[in-house]
Image (spheres, rainbow, N blue to C red):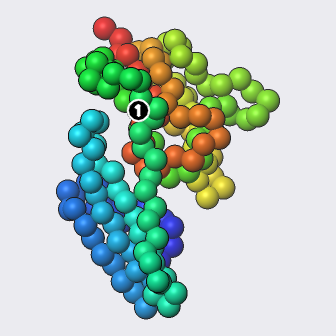
Amino acid sequence: MDLKEIQNLIKFVAKSGASEVKLETGDFKITIKTTSDTASHETIPVVQHIPVQTAVTPTHVAPQTTPETPNSPASTESDDSKYITIKSPMIGTFYRKPSPDKPPFVEVGSDIKVGTPLCVIEAMKLFNEIESEVTGKVVKILVDDASPVEFDQPLFLIEPAS
């Protein structure tokens, strides 16, 4: 099973609402568990890959999906509810710039339109430009430049244009 097939399986499980899926072949075993994060109301896939021949204890890979939160999560949750969250469509490395010598695509406070490039995500040596699907203003950038991101991880908070 290659990386693309595993990514597709994770997407399918996350969308299906199943709480756990186990897949075992001759040389490896994958367990995908989803848990509900009550603060953000999103499903977080958890993947375990255990080689059958050498498994003593399961390895646990949990995606980092929660950005740093302020001291008052209750007020932040209600404040953030008016914003649109742009999430990562894939697993990869997040880049704010088209290349190291260029300026970032957007900054906090940037006005954006549908189709405005926001970032690039590198996945398997391919650079995928992520464009905005909404018109508004960038309120917060939730990921540091050159950081790994997971599928469906929040990247930007956008205040929609009225």
From the viewer's side, name the closer residue of 94 and 67.
Answer: 67
In the depicted structure, whether residue 138 falls above or below residue 56:
above
User: 146 left or right of 139?
Assistant: right
Residue at far top of view: 162
Disc 1 packing (10 Å; few <14; some 14–19; many ≥20):
many
User: 33 left or right of 70?
Assistant: left
Where in the figure is residue 125, as x and y percent of width and height?
A: 66, 55
From the viewer's side, name the closer residue of 71 and 96.
Answer: 71
Where in the figure is residue 118, as x and y percent of width and height?
A: 54, 29
Give the structural element (helix, strand or loop) at label 1.
Answer: strand
Q: Residue at 31% across / 8% down in the picture?
A: 162
User: Can I make out residue 64 in this image?
Assistant: yes
Q: Residue at 79% across / 30% down in the picture?
A: 101
In the depicted structure, whether residue 12 falls above or below residue 100:
below
In the depicted structure, whether residue 116 falls above or below residue 137:
below
Where in the figure is residue 121, as x and y percent of width and height?
A: 57, 44
From the viewer's side, name the closer residue of 152 and 51.
Answer: 51
Where in the figure is residue 52, as x and y percent of width and height?
A: 45, 87
Q: Residue at 39% across / 23% down in the picture?
A: 71
Amino acid residing under circle 1 = Ile
Residue receiving disc 1: 86
Q: Quadrant of residue 25?
A: bottom left
